[in-house]
Image (cartoon, coloured by chain):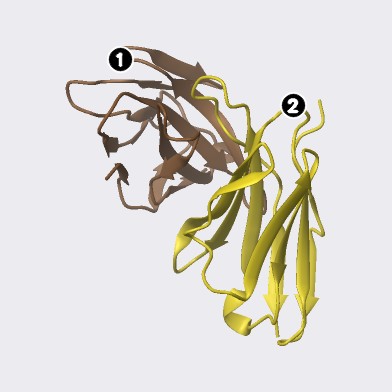
Amino acid sequence: DAGVIQSPRHEVTEMGQEVTLRCKPISGHDYLFWYRQTMMRGLELLIYFNNNVPIDDSGMPEDRFSAKMPNASFSTLKIQPSEPRDSAVYFCASSHSWGNQPQHFGDGTRLSIL
Amino acid sequence: GDSVTQMEGPVTLSEEAFLTINCTYTATGYPSLFWYVQYPGEGLQLLLKATKADDKGSNKGFEATYRKETTSFHLEKGSVQVSDSAVYFCALILTGGGNKLTFGTGTQLKVEL
């Protein structure tokens, strides 16, 4: 089975630019999570969806960040405008809803804002 | 609130040494417990899990036992290899918590020849 697919794997852009990160969850999974990982703050949950509906976005750092899930097989995390402090590795994960199922992670997008 | 506490790293061991990474949790209900591993440059991979008290999760020579009385889920391996060098995360999901994982801060393991 294909795992969680994220794109791009690496993104380097200048501050002020719009950045869009993409995620395709595992087919049949109805939960989708976006995380950010940095050395200073570790792994942070930004937002998660259930059946394409955002459930908790309390981890989104500020209004410059937005996330959408237009259908069960695709989600985006957008940063506009980007700032150097947004540089991090962004992970997407998905899981089934029945039982306490583990999350399956993508390989991440390494974002560098210059 | 729910939380997971892991031992500070980095942990440095020689190859074939015994490994223990301590993990304790605080939860209001009955969580399922997980260990994830992150190799350099990769995402987190599920290593093992346990869903109820006294369950033992095991995979790739690693094991951990869900101890409700001590609220612990310590990770152990009898003989580590250089290829086990990675960051290990302990995590929990609370039943009815929306499949949301609560992670520990991670423990870096370095195994040397």
Instruction: List the residue tagged with mark 2.
Output: A28
- Give the residue type at disc 1: Ala
**Residue A11, picture quadrant:** bottom right
* Chain corresponding to brown in the figure: B
Measured as percent of width and height from the top left, residue B80 is found at 48, 32
Write down the chain letter for disc 1.
B
Percent across and percent down for residue B56 are: 39, 14
- In the displayed structure, A32 sits above or below A1; it is below
**Numbered disc total:** 2
Q: Residue at x 78, y 29 (%)?
A: A27
Q: Secondary structure at mark 1?
A: loop
Asked if A100 appears above or below A16 in the picture, the reply is above
Say which of marks 1 and 2 sits in front.
2
Q: Chain letter of disc 2?
A: A
Question: Could one spot residue B89 in this view of the protein?
Answer: no
What residue is rendered at 31% in x and 23% in y? B30
- Residue matched to label 1: B53
Q: Residues within 10 Å of mark 1 (few under 14, many from 20)?
A: some
The reply, left or right, for residue A13 in relation to residue B60 is: right
The quadrant of the image that shows the N terminus of chain A is top right
Q: Nearer the viewer, residue A28 or B8?
A: A28
Residue at image position (70%, 53%) is: A108
Please tell me the colour of chain A: yellow
**Front-most of residues B45 and B17:** B45
Residue A35 can be seen in this image:
yes
Residue B83 numbered tag: none
Q: Quadrant of the C terminus of chain A?
A: bottom right
Q: CA distance from mark 1 to mark 2?
A: 29 Å
